[in-house]
Image (cartoon, rainbow, N blue to C red):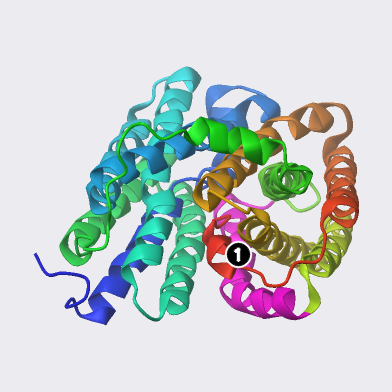
Amino acid sequence: MISPALAPSKTRTAAVVFAGFCAFVTLFAPQPLLPLLAREFRVTPGAISLVVTASTLAVALAAPFAGVVADRFGRKRVIVPAAFLLAVPTLMAATAGSYGQLLFWRFLQGIFTPGIFAVVIAYINEEWEAGAGAATAAYVTGTVLGGFSGRALAAMVASHANWRWAFVALGTLNLLGAIAIRAWLPAGHRFKRTRAGGSPRAAMLRHLRNPRLVATYVVGFCVMFSLLGTFTYVNFYLAAPPFNLSTAALGLLFVVYLVGAVVTPVAGRAIDRLGHRFALVVAFTGGATGVCLTLVHSLPVVMVGLTLACTGVFIANSAGSSYVGSAATESRASAVGLYVTFYYVGGSGGSAIPGFFWTHGGWPACVALIVGVQLLTITLALIFWKPLPKSNMLTAAIEEG
């Protein structure tokens, strides 16, 4: 096996890109299919949104354990099996004969996902002697491309065949990506096994007694809540009159996610220069404006609004995740792990709770909820975030996909 120090840099970087791609190509892919799936299984929009919630909740539950396992057995020994295992429930979702079975397979997808994305971040930190920032940027690019490609591919295949073939296509992509990761990702030579006897629970409890970190965890919750609340229920809004968008057209809406490939490095420089609080306030002020613009019955205006909303979330997540890395005075890995957990619990809430608002007030009620959450986020940052000497953008690789 070639050591990371001797491996061709392009090959190793390609493996990191594939890891980011695989981690997020399936996680949110069903979003443009939700109106179609709601008709297929004869359930309400609030109920079918659990197809997204099931995976994000599983990610939140599994993320802390993925790090613990990787600390004991090594990075590649977790990343590669997780990538192959992720393909199994993705393919099996195509066989779901009931709503409950589909939720089960989606939950398993979420269980295996942190074994890729959470561990790759640790791998980059350990194995790159120089150019870790470039490696992280490559990984982030993979997550953005995966998040967009999964949604667009699922919508395209479902519109020309059916939703089952969409999961077959996604599972095949996962499998090919896993093969590439296994072939191109070198085994780590700087990994040091963590032996039993430590007390990660005590470190986490100390983090939860730090008001600045707790506020940041709530910020992470609100950030992902806003993202999934917006991009889950806007599909039902745009599938209905006066827009009447098809499944394929709904998939193409997620082209706004590609903004993340441009925004992430720019946001990092802005955070370093202007500070975390300023960046988050500007991000969610623009994001709230964008969400409100979607109420205008004009598709170009809605697209502008969704672009603002998506950009705001990317910047806010960069500010929140980098603030964790700077504010934690000890056990930074567990501090970031807690942020990941809160982040994806927020995603679970964002894909489920707006369903009640949709039932009683449609898209305008969902917009009111999302804007309220963003205003809460701004308030928390203004009260609890104190200026820090330097941001740590490497932790911002906790991508929203």
Q: Nearest the camera: 337 or 313? A: 337
- Label total for image: 1
Task: Please report the residue visible at 43 percent of the width from the left and 67 percent of the height from the top.
Answer: 139
Name the element at disc 1.
helix
Vertical order, 177 against 92 (above or below): below
Query: Quick check: 358 left or right of 192?
Result: right
Query: For this view, does 213 lie left or right of residue 283?
Result: left
For this view, does 138 lie left or right of residue 10? right
Quadrant in the picture for residue 131? bottom left
Q: Residue at x 44, y 26 (%)?
A: 102
Q: Which residue is mark 1?
A: 257
Amino acid carrying mark 1 in the image? Tyr
Q: Which residues are magenta?
A: 245-273
Q: Is residue 48 above or below residue 337?
A: above
Residue furthest to the front: 197
State yes or no: residue 249 in magenta: yes
Q: Residue at x 86, y 49 (%)?
A: 380
* Main secondary-structure element of the magenta-colored stretch: helix
Question: x%, y% of residue 109?
Answer: 40, 36
